[in-house]
Every structure is written in C-alpha cells, then in structure tokens.
Image: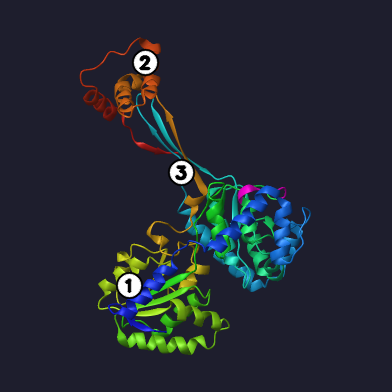
C-alpha cells in the first residue's frame, strides 16, 4: 500500500479519491433499476416480489412459503455449532446490557396553575431488519439491529434475508432464534425493501427499515424514505487507524486488512506521524494479505482506497480524521484516551491496542450499524433512540390562556395569520367576555410564566 505525505500532490489526490468515494448517490443506471423494482412491488405486491426473487435469487416463492415456518427456523438453528450458539448468546447479553443504557422515557412538566406539557416516548409499531447475505452470512447484524429495537419496546420485528444464505448458513437462523425474531421472510435486495415499505399480501408493511446492504439496497432505502423511515443510506465500510511510533505495526496492518476484506470499495487508512511505523505497516500488509481467504478483495480495496498518510503532528492527524469522519477510528498512540476526546466525527472509536474493531463488530455491546461515507458528521450509531416516536402533548388552562392570549395573538399577527390569533381570542371571549388589552403584555406575561415553571418529572 502506498505511503503518502499528506502535504504533497500524490497524498492530496489519494485523499480526494477517498473523500469522493464517500458520496452515496447511486449511479443513474442503479437508481433507475431500483425505481423499476420498487414500482413493480408497490403496484403488484406478492406477484412482483416473487417474480423478482426467482429472477435474482433463483428461488420460487409463494404465499405459502415466503415466510419461514417457526419449526424450520428452529431446525436450522440447531444445526449451528454449540460454540457459535454460545458466542451468539454472550454477544446478545452484552448488546442488551449496553442498549439498556439508552432507554428513553416519557417526561412531564407539571405547573402549579394546571398546565401540563408532556414529552411522550413510544416505540414504533413495526420494524424491518435487512440482514444481508450473498458472499457471507451476517448473524451479528441480526443481534445488532433486533436487540436495540426490542429494548425500545417494538412489538413486531420482521427480518428479510437472501434465501440461499439463510438455508445454507445455520448460524443465521441461530442468531434469529437467539434474538427472538420469528417473523422471517426469504426475500432480499431492493425488492425486499419495497415489500417492507409498502407491504404485500404476504408481508405487512413496517414503519422503519434498518440494516446494511449493497448499493441496490442502499438506493432502495433512499427511494422508499417517506413511505417508511430508514436508519441511514449506508455505503462501503471504512476504518482509520491513528498511530504513532508506539503502535505495533503487526496489529495496525491486521486491522486494516480486517476492514479491506469486507468489500473492494472498503477504505482502510492509516494516519501516522512515524515514517518507521509507516514502512513496517506496509510490509506487514503485504505479508498478512497473502494468507487471507479473501485476499483478492482485500488487495483490491487497498489498491483503490487504502493509504498510509504521513503527517507532521498528532494535531494534524486529528484534523485529517475529523475531515474523513469515518465509520471506525482506532487510536493506537501513547495517549489514546486524550486523543480520542479530540475526535469529534466518527461512528465508533476504539481506544488502545486491545480494542480491535472486531470487538465492536461482534461482541462489545454497541451496535455495529454505523454511519459511513462521512455521515458521522451528522448521523449517530444505530440505537434504542432510533426505534421510538416522540410526541408532544400540551394541556393548557383557561387561566394561563387569559394571561398569554395577547402574546400568542401578537406573534400570529406578525406572521400574517389572523386566523390563528382569532382562534385564541375567541376562547377568551367565550370564557369571560372580550379580553381587555394590557399596557405591557410581554413584561407581565413573562413574569407569570416564570412563576409557574415547575420541576421536570420522569414517569
């Protein structure tokens, strides 16, 4: 992999290519293909969904077999090894414990004159979990999406996953059983996203769709947004390893390859102040890649979007990391805790040599569904908060309305909405006759408002 100085032309060109890769806008041909798929499923329901499944997956479905029977789900799960099932159970416990910390609660602001303002938190009624397949099975995605939704209280979870992956990888069924997800459909791709968003005869629609997928799945999520909510428009995976001369080049290279083996479009980047470390990491990458089962994928990823950037200082390194705003950042430096505090844009941060990204991918507890492509500047990791609705509830009293009607009407009239103002004034008139104007309504009402503010209560 290339060793590049950030301040020269080659370094700037490679950085530009990495940042350009982050764009999540689909190519026109993909966008049109996805639009046609969505239209077919939306307009014809099961007929279109099953035809597309036979075309793309080579599997014939019907209303009788689209949903996986619970008995088959359990039978497949039992074929997974005891070790895999134990690992899934331990990971599920960690994930649940972490996400319990994210619970949100309804809060009520009670005030002495009877005004009550409520921030009501309720779970979504149905969530679709997209579990990718194809080249590999991803049982960890089952746990990382289902468990936060369950902690939020979502009553209906619907999993969709490629049929061949599901039938040939029993560990996927084991994860579904461990997560207590029993509504499972063997459909995939953009057609599965369309089915979840709009519903078919066999698959009732959901309120939100979460989980990673390929470019077609990502584009489908973009296009159905509005019919259903989505977690994010995910792109290829990425890691930045921030390292100084105290880092172990063997571990740095191993973690870069762990990311590169995902996808030829994945980005694996090392940012370092040490020229010696940079050279050692490059040697280790060549050595370790030779033994990977997905060597071709990893090497293609490193060739296209990999880099070892040499920077003049750790301060410059931090600026570069925040500019990339990557999905994963590993900090392998002399003072990793301090530097981690300065990283403001990242999906997840891994501190110190023991914190391999794989720990977060599978086991630590936080969800591995993270913002990609620079979206960490404004998106957060998937969490319990993604599976709730928030509603504001206002109960006013006539006493408070009498005191504040002039202020409300003043603001409405300032916007040219005299109907809004009238709706308030009519209430006062019907309650106690015409409202007498006050000489200084703003001052008086502000004092009244301050006087009735009460403590925030959690219920």
Residue at mark 3 to residue at mark 1: CA–CA distance:
34 Å
Which disc, if any, is residue 188?
none
Q: Which residue is mark 3?
A: 105
Rendered location of residue 408, percent (x, y): 33, 25
Secondary structure under the numbered disc 1 in the rendered image: helix
Secondary structure under the numbered disc 2 in the rendered image: helix
Q: Which residue is mark 2?
A: 428
Instruction: Tell me which corner region of the image, top left, top right, bottom left or bottom right, holds residue 119.
Output: top left
Q: Residue at 42%, 65% (x, y): give it.
A: 348
> If you read the primary sequence from the N terminus, does the residue marked by circle 3 or circle 2 appear first?
3
Q: Residue at 30%, 77% (x, y): give it.
A: 6
In screen coordinates, is 268 left or right of 187?
left
In screen coordinates, is 65 left or right of 254?
right
Which disc, if any, is residue 336?
1
Could you tell me which quadrant the N terminus lies in?
bottom left
Residue at mark 3 to residue at mark 2: CA–CA distance:
35 Å
What secondary structure is the stretch in magenta mostly built from?
Answer: loop
Q: Is residue 29 magenta?
A: no
Residue 355 visible to the viewer = yes
> If you read the primary sequence from the N terminus, does the residue marked by circle 1 or circle 2 appear first?
1
Packing grade of label 3 (10 A; few <14, some 14-19, many >=20) is some
> If you read the primary sequence from the N terminus, does the residue marked by circle 3 or circle 1 appear first?
3
Q: Nearer the viewer, residue 8 or 365?
A: 8
Region of the chain picked out in magenta, as a range = 197-202
Packing grade of label 1 (10 A; few <14, some 14-19, many >=20) is some
Residue at mark 1 to residue at mark 2: CA–CA distance:
62 Å
């Amino acid at each position: 992999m290339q060793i590049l100085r950030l301040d020269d032309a080659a370094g700037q060109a490679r950085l530009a290519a990495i940042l350009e890769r982050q764009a999540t806008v689909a190519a026109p041909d993909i966008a049109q293909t996805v639009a046609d798929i969505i239209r077919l499923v939306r307009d014809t329901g099961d007929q279109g969904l099953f035809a597309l499944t036979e075309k793309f997956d080579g599997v014939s479905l019907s209303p009788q077999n689209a949903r996986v029977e619970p008995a088959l789900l359990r039978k497949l799960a039992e074929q997974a090894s005891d070790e895999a099932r134990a690992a899934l159970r331990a990971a599920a416990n960690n994930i649940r414990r972490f996400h319990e910390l994210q619970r949100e609660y309804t809060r009520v602001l009670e005030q002495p004159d009877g005004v009550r303002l409520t921030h009501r938190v309720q779970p979504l009624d149905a969530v679709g979990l997209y579990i990718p397949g194809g080249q590999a099975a991803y049982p960890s995605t089952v746990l990382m999406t289902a468990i936060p939704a369950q902690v939020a209280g979502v009553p209906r979870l619907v999993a969709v996953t490629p049929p061949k992956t599901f039938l040939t990888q029993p560990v996927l069924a084991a994860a579904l059983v461990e997560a207590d997800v029993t509504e499972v459909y063997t459909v995939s791709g953009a057609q599965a996203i369309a089915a979840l968003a709009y519903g078919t005869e066999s698959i009732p629609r959901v309120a939100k769709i979460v989980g990673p997928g390929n470019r077609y799945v990502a584009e489908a999520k973009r296009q159905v947004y509005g019919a259903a909510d989505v977690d994010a428009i995910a792109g290829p995976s990425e890691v930045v390893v921030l390292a100084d001369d105290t880092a172990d080049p063997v571990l740095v290279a191993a973690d870069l390859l762990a990311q590169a083996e995902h996808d030829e479009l994945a980005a694996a980047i090392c940012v370092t102040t040490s020229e010696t470390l940079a050279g050692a990491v490059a040697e280790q990458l060549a050595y370790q890649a030779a033994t990977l089962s997905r060597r071709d994928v990893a090497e293609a990823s490193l060739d296209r979007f990999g880099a070892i950037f040499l920077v003049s200082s750790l301060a410059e390194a931090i600026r570069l990391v925040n500019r990339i705003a990557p999905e994963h950042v590993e900090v392998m430096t002399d003072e990793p805790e301090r530097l981690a505090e300065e990283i403001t844009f990242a999906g997840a941060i891994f501190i110190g040599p023991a914190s391999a990204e794989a720990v977060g991918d599978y086991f630590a507890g936080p969800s591995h569904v993270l913002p990609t492509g620079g979206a960490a500047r404004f998106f957060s990791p998937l969490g319990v908060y993604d599976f709730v609705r928030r509603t504001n509830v206002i109960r006013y009293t006539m006493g408070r309305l009498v005191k504040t009607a002039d202020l409300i009407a003043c603001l409405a009239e300032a916007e040219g909405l005299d109907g809004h103002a009238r709706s308030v004034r009519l209430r006062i008139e019907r309650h106690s006759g015409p409202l007498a104007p006050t000489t200084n309504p703003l001052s008086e009402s502000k004092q009244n408002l301050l006087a009735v503010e009460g403590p925030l209560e959690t219920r």
